[in-house]
Amino acid sequence: MSRLDGWPLIPVASVTRESELVCLDPGLDEFIALSRHIAADPRAMLTVVADDITPYRLLDLPVGTRVDRDDETLMTTDFAEAPIPALDDEFTFRWDVDDHRLTYSVESGQAVAAVGTVGILGDTATFDAVETTPAFQRRGLGRHVMATLSQQALGRGARRGVLAASGQGRQLYLAMGWQPRLEMLSLMGA
């Protein structure tokens, strides 16, 4: 991980973005200056994390940027041993492990029903891209994926988890004991 203007520049290398510049309540002027780093680059993201993102949301954005997400909440939890909800017999699972990153997929035949990724660095686990395919929602798969990933993280030395919860996923995480900490706003180059 490198730094850009003093803020962490995280190499993401995902399907939708190459990098993400993350800043903690930098102030409006610095936020506008930082947004110029991503302008016109559709694979670059700038995320601001703050108690209240409203002032950032109300800004006129520089040309070449667009709001990608404005409904996310930074949430955290402290891990504890917990049971993992069982999968129905129609499902199988698969692990993809890449150094400090684990992806867990639940499948029904050839279809991916639910998936999630956790990256572990020291005693912190960062969860990303946890989702359930619409045809399989409301069947407990999101809870199963989160519990499975959490137990893997705990077993690998993580004591605390962090994630960016979408508006849709927030209720699941609250029900699982995660605590909301800060609001998030993410811009992408356009």
Image: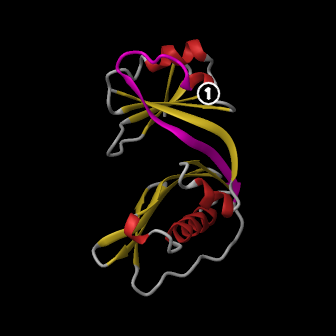
Image coordinates for residue 10, horizontal then vertical, percent: 47, 35
Quadrant for the C terminus in the image: top left
Which residue is at 34% across, 20% downward? 64
Q: Amino acid at mark 1?
A: Thr
In this rendering, position of residue 19 left or right of residue 6: left
Which residue is under mark 1? 54
Image coordinates for residue 160, horizontal then vertical, percent: 68, 54
Which residue is at 68% across, 56% downward? 178
Outermost residue toward the left? 110
The quarter holding residue 37 reads top left
Q: Is residue 124 visible?
A: yes
Tell me if residue 137 comes above or below residue 46 in the rendering: below
* Residue 67 vs residue 97, the one in the foreground: 67
* Residue 88 vs residue 66, the one in the foreground: 66
Outermost residue toward the bottom? 89
Image coordinates for residue 58, horizontal then vertical, percent: 55, 22
Image coordinates for residue 39, horizontal then vertical, percent: 37, 20
* Residue 72 vs residue 160, the one in the foreground: 72
Q: Secondary structure at mark 1?
A: helix
Q: Is residue 74 magenta?
A: yes
**Main SS type for the magenta part?**
strand
- Count of marks, rendered view: 1
Q: Please provide the residue range marked out in magenta.
A: 57-78
Residue neighbourhood size for the residue with mark 1, other residues' Cα within 10 Å, grouped as few (<14), some (14–19), many (≥20): few
Q: Is residue 182 magenta?
A: no
